[in-house]
Structures are given as C-alpha cells and as structure tokens.
Amino acid sequence: TSKMANNNPAHIVLTNVRLSYTHLDKPYSNNGGEPKYSATILVPKTDPANKQKIDAAIRAATARMREKKGNSFPETPKTSVHDGDGVRPSDGQPFGDECKGCWVFTASSKTQPDCRDQYKQPLLDGSELYSGVWAHVGVTFFGYDSGSNKGIGVALDTVMKARDGEPLGGMRASADDDFADIPTTVAAPETAAAGSSTITGYDPNTFAPIYG
C-alpha cells in the first residue's frame, strides 16, 4: 500500500543532519515558555541539497504568508536558520564548535514528533536520540505574525535515527570513571586479614571486625 506523499512545499526532509539540545522524549520549557518538544538541527554545508530544500521551504512559507497578509509581511522575513560559522543572534557570541561548517536552526512542536529507529520502526527508547546523534528529519517551515514580530519558524514533524555520533555535552558521567583513581579507605573484609576471612568478633570501641 502506498501513502500519498506530503505535497506541502514548506515541508521538507533533511538527510544526514546532526541533532543537538534534544528534547524529544518529553516537552521542555525554555525560559518559562510553553513546553515543547524540540531539537537543534545542524545541517552540514558539505551537502548543498539540504540547504536548497531549506531555501525553497522558506520561500514557500513566505509566499503563503504574503497571500494572507499582503505587503504587511516582509518579502525577506527573518528566519531561524543561522550560519554556524558566524555568531549567535541572541548574544553576538560565536556558535559552539559543533556548529562549525553547518547551518543551524531549532525546530519544535507542541506534540511529540514521530520518531523512528534506523529500521524505520517506532523508536521506543528516547535516549537513542541524544545530542550528537545523526538523523534524518522532517520539518515544516511556517510564517508567524504577531504585530511587530514577523518571521519564519520551523516545526519538527518526524525524526529517524541515521547513525550514532559523538555525544555533545550533557551526558551523564560514569561513577566508575569518576572514582577510578580514588583509593578505598576501608579494605574489603575478605582481604583485611592475611590468610584468614573468619570474623570472630568486633572491637567494642571501633566496631571493626576481628578475624580469627
């Protein structure tokens, strides 16, 4: 059975992109705003086809808004797609090293995106889509107009894991690694006394075991 393809020109599928700041298993509230599922998408510049798709989707979303709003919606609106080799518009600081050589944007959704594993099966373990993983994503560009704030946003619709990548920050530390160089201050009972492992009593002052 074949499904009808999505014919929305503002909806595109970007292949072999990297995910960062992933919130795909539960919604996340940024600065007290409405909780949303989201991910930052890092699109390598080495594949120009992805950028062509992005530009075409932005044009489609802009045209749709200008049909509704007329000239009150700008012909070249601000978008959330930024150059990872430049600076962040929020604070003028350079993007992180992981953004170098990439186009960068954040996509979000009020409802949980349809997430799949490498075999296109529903992804049951949300930790598989960690910050640093490579994926294919389906996103829809859309116009917004709230008076003085006009532009093009990005909705996150679907995510498919492509392959594992080097995790980006925020990974839980391993206790084995953290404490590997710290000597244990209490010897294990079986090695406390040479040649003997039978406890015959306890020291009344220190409560340490006495071996017979």
Image: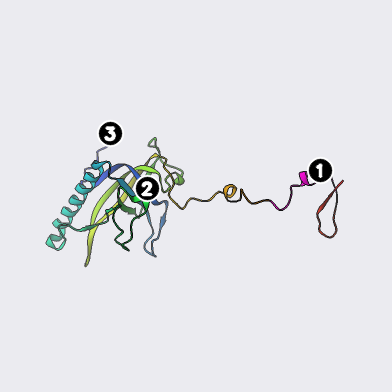
Query: Is 67 situated above or below 136?
Result: below
Q: In x, y percent, where is residue 135?
A: 36, 42
The residue depicted at 29 percent of the width and 61 percent of the height is: 89
Q: In x, y percent, where is residue 58?
A: 21, 51
Which numbered circle lies on residue 19?
2
Residue hosting label 3: 2
Q: CA distance from mark 2 to mark 3?
A: 29 Å
Secondary element type, mark 1? loop
Q: Is residue 66 visible?
A: yes
Q: Is residue 144 visible?
A: no
Question: Which segment is the magenta one?
Answer: 184-200
Q: Viewer-proximal residue, 43 or 181?
A: 181
Which numbered circle lies on residue 194?
1
Binning the other alpha carbons within 10 Å of mark 1 as few (below 14), some (14 to 19) or many (20 upward) gives few
- Type of residue at label 2? Leu
Secondary element type, mark 3? loop
Q: Is residue 87 within the magenta segment?
A: no
The colour scheme is rainbow
